[in-house]
Image: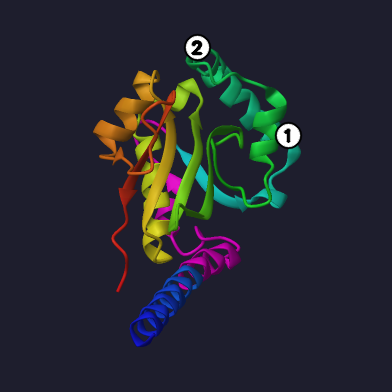
Amino acid sequence: MGRKSAKGKERKLRRKEENEITEHLWKLVAEANKIDDPLAPLVSFQKYNKNGLNLTISCHKRESVEEDILLWALNLTKSNMESLYEESGWGWKDRDKLQEMKDDNARYLIVKNEDEKPVAFIHFRFDLDYGQPVVYCYEIQLESEVRNKGLGFFLMQILQLFAIKNSLFKVSATILRINDKSMDFFMRKLKFTEDETSPDDECYMIVSKLARVKT
């Protein structure tokens, strides 16, 4: 009886410790989500003036994104990704993608040119993914005129900084295995690696890059 009682106490203590860890990790995500504009203190990342581009970058919660900007983002994503979605077997539905983009936890980096025309965006979220607090990149899409000029790399650096400043573990993303350009961008240029949570038998891959957690 004494031995069983000791084991029972150990299990309770272990569960308590696990619950405390989970609660702490959720708090990290909750604190990040309380921040209205995580880009505000990163002044040097609010403009991109390189390779012939003169762009401004702003960060928004879902509710502050204007409807016409959201529809532009949907149409850009559709133009860039619909054929890949269909070819991979994932399938494309405007309604489903729009619902994902309108999620209450969605955040956006919006990039505009000198004429105030949107030319690129990132849809991201602060979330707990498989027990780990992350910045999750749901979508990064660029108009053709601003591609291959370092902008995508620059925008992903911002997400990395968000993870570091909020003590989140990593930046994660989902990419289609048949999307060679996306694979090259994340795996070669950004140095992401296949995440331990990535499935082996799906048309997509989960990739991630650890954040240097601040001390």
| Percent x, y of residue 30 | 56, 66
Q: Residue furthest front?
A: 1
Does residue 185 appear anywhere in the picture? yes
The residue lying at 35 percent from left, 19 percent from top is 180
Q: Which residue corresponds to mark 2?
A: 87
Image position of 183 with respect to 171: above or below: above
Image position of 212 with respect to 186: above or below: below
Three-letter amino acid code at disc 2? Glu
Of the pair 12 and 47, the residue shown nearer to us: 12
- Could you classify mark 1 by the number of other residues whose Cα lies within 10 Å: few (under 14), some (14-19), or many (20 or more)? few
Three-letter amino acid code at disc 1? Asp
Circle 2 — which element? helix
Does residue 148 appear anywhere in the picture? no
Image position of 100 with respect to 160: above or below: above
| Percent x, y of residue 170 | 36, 53
Q: Is residue 138 magenta?
A: no
Q: Which residue corresponds to mark 1?
A: 68
> Residue 164 bears which disc, if any?
none
Image position of 120 with respect to 66: above or below: above
Of the pair 128 and 46, the residue shown nearer to us: 128
Coloured how?
rainbow
